[in-house]
Amino acid sequence: MSQVEALAAAILEDHVGGPAARCVLALSAARARVSFDALQGADIARLTAEIDRALEVILHDREMRVSCVQKVFGLLRSSAREEGLDAKSETVAIRTEADVLSARSMGRQIAQGIGFSASAEVQVVTAISELARNIVVYAGQGEIRIAVLDGSRRGIEIVAQDRGPGISNVDEILSGKYRSKTGLGMGLRGTRSLMDEFELATSERTGTRITARKFLR
Ligand SMILES: Nc1ncnc2c1ncn2[C@@H]1O[C@H](COP(=O)(O)OP(=O)(O)OP(=O)(O)O)[C@@H](O)[C@H]1O
Ligand SMILES: [Mg+2]
């Protein structure tokens, strides 16, 4: 067992006991297809999401589970940081619905770490969901970068970027006149209203880049 895995097991052990802790970690690593010995930035989101999923079955107290996953996430991030990865932001490649869940989970962990309230956390996670799902559905693939803002105003920044076909009718969509064929057409408008800042750059040639920020009150 690697040192990181042993430390993660020690965190989980307090809540679920030793054998279950080791089992959860082994199962989650296999499902996320990662090795504790060689964790890369993007692995951490997948692995954390899988640990959360595995714990759901055995640790029913939601608050306890959230704090447990948060601690493991902090550990994984700091161990990846020692490997020289960027500490302030995490990028999740988006191609499938599973990637949407990874991005959600990453966003949840980061939002909790910053100290967002439970309701603000839900808003951030919802925004990430909408942007990530749009990438899957309309662009095929892209990425979501989630960054901690720790300047004069503390908060979180989400950058959703793809090289898809671009959005030709942005004004119509953001003004609410647009009626989506497939969805409610509320994803972009909803995201804008959930977040404090919203910037959209799109063209047929370069694809779409949406930057959304939310600050701590
Ligand atoms: N990343 C993207 N690339 C290309 N087109 C996009 C992208 N994101 C959104 N669009 C276009 O903008 C429209 C509005 O997106 P929005 O997320 O607001 O609504 P929706 O996806 O149609 O429905 P909902 O999100 O409510 O299920 C989409 O129907 C789609 O045509
Ligand atoms: Mg949408």
Image (cartoon, rainbow, N blue to C red):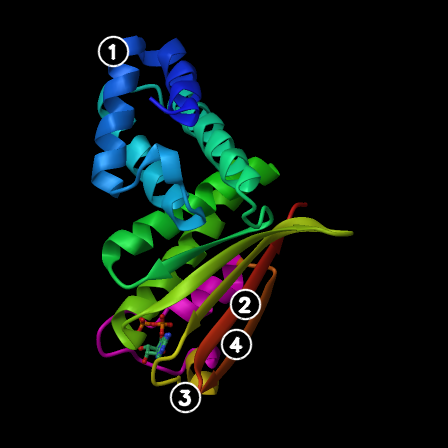
Q: Is mark 3 within 8 Å of ligand 1?
A: yes
Q: Which mark is residue 211?
A: 2
Q: CA distance from mark 4 to mark 3?
A: 12 Å
Residue 117 visible within the image: no
The amino acid marked with disc number 2 is Thr
Crowd rating for badge 2 (residues with CA inside 10 Å; few <14, some 14–19, many 20+): some
Q: Which label's residue is closer to the chain start, 2 or 3? A: 3
C-beta proximity under 8 Å, tags 4 and 2: yes
Q: Nearer the viewer, mark 2 or mark 1?
A: 1
Look at the image and tell me in which quarter the C terminus lies: top right
C-beta proximity under 8 Å, tags 4 and 3: no
The amino acid marked with disc number 1 is Pro
Q: Position of residue 16 (x, y in %)?
A: 31, 12
Question: Residue lying furthest right in this view?
Answer: 152
Check disc 4 and report its element: helix, strand or loop: strand
- Residue ID at (37%, 56%): 129
Q: Which mark is residue 200?
A: 4
Q: Which label's residue is closer to the chain start, 2 or 1? A: 1
Q: CA distance from mark 4 to mark 1?
A: 48 Å
Crowd rating for badge 3 (residues with CA inside 10 Å; few <14, some 14–19, many 20+): few
Q: Which residue is mark 3?
A: 169
Please state the extent of the stretch shown in magenta in the rendering. Answer: 174-194
Q: CA distance from mark 2 to mark 1?
A: 43 Å
Q: CA distance from mark 4 to mark 2?
A: 6 Å
